[in-house]
């Protein structure tokens, strides 16, 4: 099983050490990775140095034998298709009943193999008798609580760790996804994306596509209405009512679709069996569920940290951010008054003085955002979440609140306090269009050009004919994958503009639709050619993002009715009413819309009927198995008594 | 197993035929009840005529042998306490491992035995070769689709069917519940209530008690505030904010408590294995879940009926009810103008003319309510719900909407359109106090007096010393149980007054608290001495009522802020603001309160942590059993291959 014996295995995962890593530490890691799981509590994987001279003896390639992978699949409860039946948890002893069992190499997808290896690496501990890191005698650890990966991270020894792209699979995927004619007219094949990138990424693309299609009806209606000759009030209000109902239904249908996908991918109820994060700590105790020893962190400590540390600190941050914005507004206003444009001689002076506050503000906002992001990560780490999913959801919620303030408070202020619609229009335009173009450049085009450049350098450098190893190529030319957070934020921001202001500015929806048709292909390109391959990560929905979109939809009802009420043409339409009556009418309308939204939320079931049936069926079967097991036991006990 | 052989079994359930039932039909029913389940598809129960001459050969007593009951318990998946472990589904072959197995008569509670018999009666079909009812040759049926109970109901042959009270158990229950000193100071023992009456009734009492305790803080705060000397605005708004937060937390804690109780009683996940209602119809098809033949009604037909028939018809009813009320208001107003009180000679004439509209309205409202109730039941029957729980939830929702309109629309009209607070005060007083007293009389005191009178008659009539059989006594003196609907409506109405108007009328809360302390004991008395015993019915929460209370809490935020804003003293307090600003301030405050409510709803988890752990543990165990079963099968398959 040692690395020396299996020099020719297929590498699946690349681990790059930082330049400061001592050779003894590298050897130790390889030893732990390849050690036998039973005798030496190792990971039982295969590992060797990359042979490419460019890799500088810092790159390890990791793989595994087929039997090791199958055992890992059983441990991770990976679900595969049972012959003549649906998805079933893989069992090594039952291999024959699974599809593809004639060809066991193809039983598992490559992304699943990489996930299994990644899980093994994450859960690899030092040996019982070890107490210091070889090569770094000053670094001591507890072999029970610390994993090797955490130790290496804390020493800053990990340069990069990522699974290798599969050139052929990627080409096939790319063909149906972006390169063929079919890819323009037909929806993306979400199952293929899932097979290659895992559920986490697949859910992002499913959502982006779903959302893009959902933009079509409001965009068409907006177009239609802006050319009609009816009154402004009729235009705005019909668009507003349509939007409220439409987006509520869309969000419910998305929830439905989410559950359908999760069921199809066998991740619907995996939450229950999710493994603790490797960073989760606590006193080892017997788990009440599995009856094995697991770290347990007291619930009250977790809640205390969450409600008494995180939440108050976040409120403070929000307050600071609001204070910053309004201070900026105040300074801007007083500067505007101090430097009027009337004196033409001093025009340039006035102009530049007027620009100073906004320049200062935008210089300040960057570091503040970064500091907040660090704080949010620190707080979420501090809360010590047991599951990766709850960790990510909590981090997302924290970032979301701050992001929401930063993104929309300016627009709110201009729209509702200044009632400065010219400013709102300008802001919206710049945000939707300019942001979209800028993002495409910084996220896709520049990294791609950089990649081409790097690739050229790599090949030119090579004096002999030897090929550059794929590990080194992907390491040097591709950008490390940073998670789907940034991509969701982009859609979320856009949805904010669409939902919050679309009744009065319907063309925002049209811009968003056009943008997303490009975004969908652009992101696909980015995942295929700009990013290093991400580890497949199981998930059963888009997590907190669903709530974020739902909350935005509710807020949108308030903003849209307010925006409509503030239009002078609408006020004219209701000129027979007093101001008080006018406001009360719109408040009542807003409440009716809110009620409709909650009614629709309530009336559409979250889980589609077929999925519910399947779920109950699975529960029924395992319940029956439990009963049979108990009946068998009782029978055996009886028999043994008779025998005595 | 025939009734003739077992004349001395313990009767558990009483079935009374109507006087028109032919003797042949009665004999047929007894035969079907006692026929062997395996050979003749009978119910395998015990049954005989009651010997009391008063019963007039129309009363059948039904019981069952212990082994029949235990088999029934296994079929119904009744959970009992496993030795050294939690609740586990009962299995006959595994009887020895359950608590009380040394004394098998006490393994099942009497209420459970009665439920088992009731389920068997409900699911009893005619024999395959039978096509007409003996004694009624004109009545034909299909032995596959019709149950005997449905046939008897459709012929109007069932006079009454109920389980017998157990005098001794009832005395014990009563002692701890209402009669001992302890019962005043300590909370009720909800488990004892559950053991005797079943989960359905127990949840009602748990809710009533929980709600009563929850009234204490707002009542105290209301009392405190009404004696304080601060401004009206401060009083009202602090009470309003407190109420919003308090009732949201209470409802969330109730949901938590519900899940705890359901877990404790083993009904948390029974929804999944719930049997179809005996009235559910559809083409027999293989169930995708259990793989046995079950009636299946197409989902689209069900949804079509629900959304295109029921909902529109209900909207029409609501509209009719609103039109009726506003017509009444209009007529009342014009009569009031037509007959002024200025001419003292015609005072009585004017007074009586003024009373005419309200008299006409109250005469009309009774039949309309009854007609609506019939319509609601008809529509819910039409929707053809598969499960009893969803049937009841849908019926409750329908009744709730209509009830809400009837109860509160008058108050709303007086408070918000007429701004007639004197009227509101009067209405509230009469509704809270008079209703409470009236209800106690009609629900508890009069039936109890009637019962005593009837009992006396029964005993006097008897010339010999023979005792009146308990079946006849309970049949003649106790009121048939009508379900918990009426009781919930009473609390719901009261909560409406408390939640919707309490910020401005805090004494309503105090009245409600005092009333409920009596209500709790009064209802206990009613269930013990006025009603016939109800069949124990499994449930895991209070069904739709939770939503009803939740919706009221949301509406309460709107009404309370509006009520506060409408108080002249509060307007004075804000006299420096214009009307428009004043309204906007209150609208903003209302939105903030709504946001707080939703945040609390979201932040408190519905299922308590310990229950979640137990639930996951059960899932884990059955999943493990399934895996072991599959591994065993694979092993056996391998062995048999080797043997070949």
Image (cartoon, coloured by chain):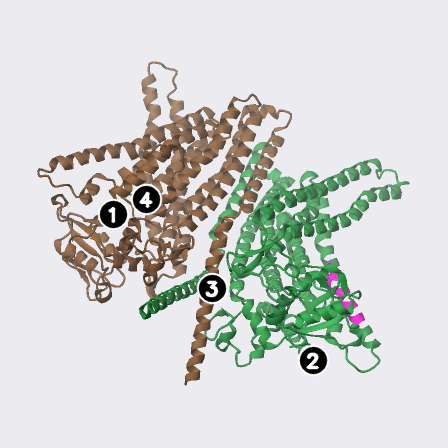
Chain colours: A green, B brown
Mark 3 belongs to chain: B
Instruction: Please state the horizontal and vertical placement of residue B358, each as a whole percent of the image.
Output: 35, 29
Secondary structure at badge 2 equals: loop
Q: Residue furthest left?
A: B463
Mark seen at residue B623: 3
Q: Which residue is mark 2?
A: A7
- Highlighted range, magenta: A439-454
Callout 4: 10 Å neighbours few (<14), some, many (20+)?
Answer: few
Mark 4 belongs to chain: B
Instruction: Please state the horizontal and vertical placement of residue A83, each as a whole percent of the image.
Output: 47, 75
Examine the rendering and report whether any part of residue A590 can be seen: yes
Instruction: Please state the horizontal and vertical placement of residue B321, each as a whole percent of the image.
Output: 38, 39
Q: Nearer the viewer, residue A533 or A301?
A: A301
Between the C-alphas of marks 3 and 2, the distance is 39 Å
Q: Which residue is mark 1?
A: B162
Between the C-alphas of marks 3 and 4, the distance is 38 Å
Q: Nearer the viewer, residue A48 or A620?
A: A48
């Amino acid at each position: 099983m040692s690395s020396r014996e299996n020099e020719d295995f297929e590498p699946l995962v690349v681990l790059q050490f930082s330049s400061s890593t001592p050779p003894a530490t590298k050897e130790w890691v390889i030893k732990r990775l390849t050690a036998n799981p039973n005798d030496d509590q190792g990971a039982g994987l295969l590992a060797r140095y990359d042979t490419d001279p460019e890799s500088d003896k810092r790159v390890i390639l990791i793989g595994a034998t087929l039997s090791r992978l199958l055992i890992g699949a059983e441990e991770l409860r990976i679900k595969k298709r049972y012959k003549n039946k649906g998805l079933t948890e893989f069992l090594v002893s039952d291999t024959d009943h699974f599809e593809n069992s004639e060809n066991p190499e193809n039983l598992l997808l490559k992304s699943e193999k990489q996930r299994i290896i990644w899980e093994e690496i994450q859960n690899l501990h030092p040996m019982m008798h070890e107490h210091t890191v070889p090569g770094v005698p000053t670094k001591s650890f507890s072999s029970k609580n610390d994993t090797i990966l955490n130790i290496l991270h804390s020493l800053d020894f990990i340069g990069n760790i990522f699974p290798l792209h599969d050139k052929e699979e990627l080409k096939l995927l790319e063909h149906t996804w972006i390169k063929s004619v079919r890819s323009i007219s037909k929806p993306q094949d979400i199952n293929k994306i899932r097979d290659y990138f895992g559920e986490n990424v697949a859910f992002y693309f499913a959502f982006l596509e779903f959302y893009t299609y959902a933009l079509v009806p409001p965009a068409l209606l907006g177009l239609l209405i802006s050319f009609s000759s009816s009154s402004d009030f009729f235009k705005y209000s019909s668009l507003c009512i349509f939007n409220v109902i439409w987006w509520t239904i869309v969000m419910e249908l998305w929830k439905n679709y989410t559950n359908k996908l999760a069921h199809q991918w066998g991740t619907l109820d995996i939450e229950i069996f999710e493994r603790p994060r490797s960073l989760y700590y606590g006193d080892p105790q017997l788990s009440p569920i599995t009856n094995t020893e697991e770290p347990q962190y007291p619930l009250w400590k977790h809640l205390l940290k969450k409600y008494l540390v995180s939440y108050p600190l976040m409120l403070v941050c929000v307050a600071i951010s609001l204070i910053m914005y309004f201070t900026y507004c105040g300074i801007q206003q007083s500067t505007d008054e101090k430097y009027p444009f009337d004196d033409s001689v001093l025009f340039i002076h006035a102009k530049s003085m007027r620009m100073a506050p906004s320049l200062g503000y935008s210089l300040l906002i960057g570091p503040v955002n970064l500091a907040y992001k660090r704080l949010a990560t620190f707080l979420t780490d501090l809360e010590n979440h047991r599951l990766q999913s709850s960790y990510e959801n909590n981090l997302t919620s924290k970032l979301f609140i701050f992001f929401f303030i930063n993104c929309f408070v300016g627009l709110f202020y201009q729209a509702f306090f200044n009632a400065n619609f010219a400013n709102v229009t300008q802001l919206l335009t710049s945000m939707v269009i300019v942001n979209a173009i800028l993002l495409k450049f910084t996220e896709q085009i520049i990294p791609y050009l950089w990649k081409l450049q790097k690739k050229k350098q790599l090949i030119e450098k090579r004096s002999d004919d030897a090929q550059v190893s794929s590990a080194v190529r992907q390491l040097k030319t591709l950008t490390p994958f940073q998670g789907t957070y940034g991509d969701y934020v982009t859609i979320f921001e856009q949805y904010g503009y669409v939902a919050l202001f679309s009744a009065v500015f319907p063309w925002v929806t049209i811009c968003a639709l056009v943008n997303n048709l490009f975004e969908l292909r652009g992101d696909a390109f980015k995942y295929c050619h700009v990013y290093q391959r991400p580890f497949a990560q199981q998930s059963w929905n888009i997590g907190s993002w669903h709530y974020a979109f739902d909350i935005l939809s509710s807020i949108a009802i308030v903003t849209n009715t307010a925006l409509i009420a503030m239009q002078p043409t609408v006020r004219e339409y209701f000129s027979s009413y007093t101001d008080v009556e006018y406001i009360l009418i719109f408040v009542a309308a807003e409440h009716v819309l809110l009620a409709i939204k909650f009614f629709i939320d309530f009336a559409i079931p979250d889980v589609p009927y077929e999925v519910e049936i399947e779920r109950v069926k699975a529960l029924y079967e395992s319940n029956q198995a439990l009963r049979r097991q108990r009946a068998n036991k009782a029978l055996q006990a009886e028999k043994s008594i008779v025998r005595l």
